Amino acid sequence: MFDPRPLVDIATAIGREAGALVQRMRASAVVSFDTKSTSTDVVTAADRASEQLVRTRLSELRPGEPILGEEEGGPDGGIAEGLTWVVDPIDGTVNYLYGIPWYSVSIAAQLDGESVAGAVVEPSTGRVWTAARGHGAFLDGTPLHVSATTDLSLSLLGYGFAYRPERRQRQADTWAAMSTRVRDLRRAGAASLDLCSVAAGRLDAYAEHGLGRWDWAAGGLIASEAGAVVRLPGSSPELGEDATFAAAPGIADAMHDALVESGFGKV
Ligand code: LIP
């Protein structure tokens, strides 16, 4: 019987090493960066150094297994058959650039494209979020459970915005429409930690478009193993082909319907 838990240990150990590296680099006065899809979509020297470290350590501990990383890419088509490692070297790069302590190193193992193990390391606090498929979700070893909320109007929704201005406007329109349907909204800037927040009941739901597999591969498993309803890109046309959605089960249907009514599926 396949046991994914040893893969969590590897993801955790390497994530901690990469987290220590990005913290050391953050301590330097200047964080150098380049831009990618837009002038606001940045990649720092620490992103690149972190991914290099993760790749090197995975090749030592798991030789020959493919790696998909945000900065250096991966197997053709993104995911190979069998086991693939999926890495976001710094999730929340803009937060990292600004010195806002809400970013992570996210490492997941996927089997035929489905996450079976994951670790989300918070370099600024040392906290580690983990999950193995079928074995629950944890924060520093403490079991995680989603919120028990059943009232949409009392729910806290995590949200995100793309880098491209034209899409941001449509996403802002949905944000505005949702603002009268829920308790409040939060835009924290790191998808992996938004998904972990749903797992911990710190958010009642989270919705965003345009994430990379590396953004959701570990956090989506952690949210699911904590009891959340999770819809990953390509699984829910009503929310949009590239939508990521996670919600406490007591409000999942109502949140889904409110988002669709607010135009979320058409941003
Ligand atoms: C970020 C995501 C965030 C999203 C940002 C960006 P990155 O990932 O975590 O949720 O809103 O646009 O994609 O680029 O920092 O790894």
Image (cartoon, grey):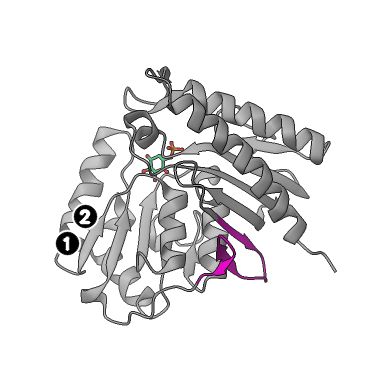
Badge 2 element: helix
Q: Are marks 1 and 2 in contact (CB under 8 Å)?
A: yes
SS of the residue under disc 1: loop
Q: Position of residue 69 (x, y in %)?
A: 60, 35
- The quadrant holding residue 141 is bottom right
Above or below, 243 relative to 78 = below
Q: Is residue 214 above or below residue 249?
A: above
Q: Residue at x 39, y 75 (%)?
A: 147
Picture residue at 82% right of the left edge, 64% below the top = 2
User: Which residue is identified by label 2?
Assistant: 175
Position of residue 113 measured from the top left corner of the image (x, y, whole percent): 66, 52
Quadrant that contains the N terminus: bottom right
190 sits to left or right of 81: left
Residue placed under numbered mark 1 in the picture: 179
Q: Given the image, on which type of amino acid does mark 1 rest?
A: Ser
Q: Nearer the viewer, residue 241 or 35?
A: 35
Left or right? Give the position of 25 relative to 189.
right
Q: Residues within 10 Å of mark 1 (few under 14, many from 20)?
A: some
Q: Which mark is residue 218?
A: none
- C-alpha gap between disc 1 and disc 2: 6 Å
Residue 161 is left or right of residue 222, and the answer is left
- Report whether residue 45 is seen: yes
> Per the image, is 110 magenta?
no
- Kind of residue sitting beneath label 2: Trp
First to last magenta residue range: 129-144
Q: How far across and down, in percent of the image, does residue 165 sit? A: 25, 34
Ligand 1 is found in the corner quadrant, namely top left
